Image (tube, rainbow, N blue to C red):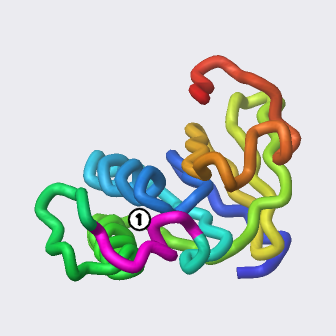
Amino acid sequence: MSADEVVETDVCIIGGGPAGCTCALYTSRANLKTVVLDKNPFVGALAITSHIANYPGVDKSMTGTELLDMMRDQAIQYGTDYKKTQVFMVDTTSEDGRKIVYTPDGIFKTKALVLGTRRRGAKATSLGMRYVRGSSY
């Protein structure tokens, strides 16, 4: 994928942690073309957890990375396109109502944008966004 290539999607999810992977699983199962943009799958809160003690159905010996890998793989099995890339800007002012997400690896035009970045990740304002209808913090 080149930096100026444009990819059209139904749903673009920024953040590949539990929230992003869960969202991707459900949107992909609903036959929506879904892409997850994940800056680094090895640095989130779950990824650095040495063992999972309180997650339903998960053995206590499982690491956060193992659980996250399972979540990501399941979303991919249902059709999610997973990209390891950093988002540096989002434009929500497009005339056709689509959101445009800019990364070093390409441009993503999407009908729906989900920020699944938690507290430590990118906030809407740091991506050049303002509060828009449908935003939840």
Does residue 45 appear to the left or right of 70 in the view shown?
right
In the rendered image of this protein, does residue 80 appear above or below residue 117?
below
The extreme top residue here reads 133
Q: Quadrant of residue 86?
A: bottom right
Query: Which residue is painted at 52% across and 61% down in the image?
Result: 35
In the rendered image of this protein, does residue 12 appear above or below residue 68?
above
Query: Which residue is painted at 51% across and 46% down in the image?
Result: 10
Question: Which three-letter amino acid code belongs to the residue tagged 1?
Answer: Thr
Regarding residue 76, the answer to whether it shows in the image is no
In this view, the residue in front, 49 or 134, is 49
Q: Give percent across and percent down for residue 111.
A: 58, 39
In this view, the residue in front, 80 or 57, is 57
Q: Considering the numbered disc 1 on the image, is that residue within a helix, a strand or a loop?
A: loop
User: What span is in magenta?
Assistant: 44-52
In this view, the residue in front, 121 or 89, is 121
Query: Which residue is painted at 75% across and 39% down in the image?
Result: 124
